[in-house]
Amino acid sequence: MAVACSYTKEAIGLSFKLLEINPEAYTAWNYRKLAFQHNIKELSDPEAIRSAVDDELRVVSSLTYQHSSINLSTEKEI
């Protein structure tokens, strides 16, 4: 049975807020991936596609930078 998914801007924004608080919320990362894949298929204009990719890369870069100390401390423990 297929489940209907909703990838609204509000839901995507909430996933960002959740990831700011907890970057290890893998369900939120997966939701963002699925939303991105779904939304990119809806675009036909190359500039709109480029803009969508750039926006998502900014989000990932921002979250990676904000939580880099978490990644570094984990690597030191290994």
Image (tube, rainbow, N blue to C red):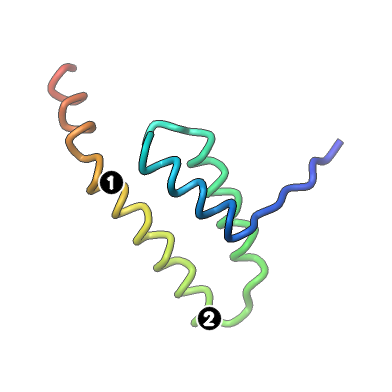
Relative to 2, residue 55 above or below: below
Camera-side residue: 13 or 58? 13
Residue occupied by mark 1: 64
Q: Badge 1: how crowded within 10 Å, few (<14), some, or many (20+)?
A: some
Camera-side residue: 16 or 72? 16
Q: Badge 2: how crowded within 10 Å, few (<14), some, or many (20+)?
A: few
Q: Which numbered marker is on residue 46?
A: 2
Q: Position of residue 23 (x, y in %)?
A: 37, 36
The residue type indicated by label 1 comes to Thr
Q: Which residue occupies 53% across, 34% down?
A: 27
Callout 1 touching callout 2 (CB < 8 Å) = no
- Mark 1 vs mark 2: give the one in front: 1
The residue type indicated by label 2 comes to Pro
Q: Which residue occupies 59% across, 51% down?
A: 11
Q: Position of residue 64 (x, y in %)?
A: 28, 46
Q: Quadrant of the N terminus?
A: top right
